[in-house]
Image (tube, rainbow, N blue to C red):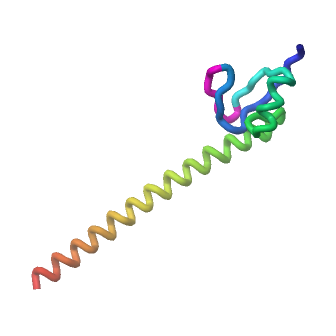
Amino acid sequence: MQTEKYYVIKPTTHSRKKVSYGDELALTESQARPLRNGGFVSPDKAAAQRIAELVKENQTLQANQTLQAKSTQESEAQTEADTEAKSEAK
């Protein structure tokens, strides 16, 4: 049985171990078929690397948006508290 190199494009478990974006797997055609059909691996290394880059970039952007949203909520809460304090002082 001849094995070929495939690259992970969607995290999954293979042979009882977790594999993540861009990992290289040596698989036979019969092992690769269900993973390819499920969209978990690709024989195209460049595509797998690009997908991994895009996923990391997306995660970074989402983390930044979450931080910005929290910061905005905190500043709005502080502004509201300041406004209430001024109203009570009058």
Residue 40 coordinates in the image, percent (x, y): 73, 36
Residue 30 coordinates in the image, percent (x, y): 85, 23
Residue 24 coordinates in the image, percent (x, y): 74, 26
**Apparent side of residue 24 relative to residue 13 in the rendered image (left or right):** right
Residue range (magenta): 16-22
Q: Residue furthest top?
A: 1
Identified at 68% across, 40% down, the residue is: 52
- Tally of numbered tags: 0
Quadrant where the C terminus sits is: bottom left
Is residue 18 a member of the stretch shown in magenta? Answer: yes
The quadrant holding residue 50 is top right
**Apparent side of residue 88 relative to residue 52 in the rendered image (left or right):** left
Identified at 81% across, 37% down, the residue is: 37
Quick one: 12 or 65, which is closer to the camera?
12
Identified at 55% across, 49% down, the residue is: 60
Quick one: 43 or 82, which is closer to the camera?
43
**Apparent side of residue 11 relative to residue 29 in the rendered image (left or right):** left
The quadrant holding residue 46 is top right
Is residue 6 a member of the stretch shown in magenta? Answer: no
Q: Residue furthest right?
A: 2
Q: Is residue 17 above or below residue 54?
A: above
Quick one: 77 or 19, which is closer to the camera?
19
Q: Is residue 51 above or below residue 66?
A: above
Q: Is residue 72 above or below residue 25?
A: below
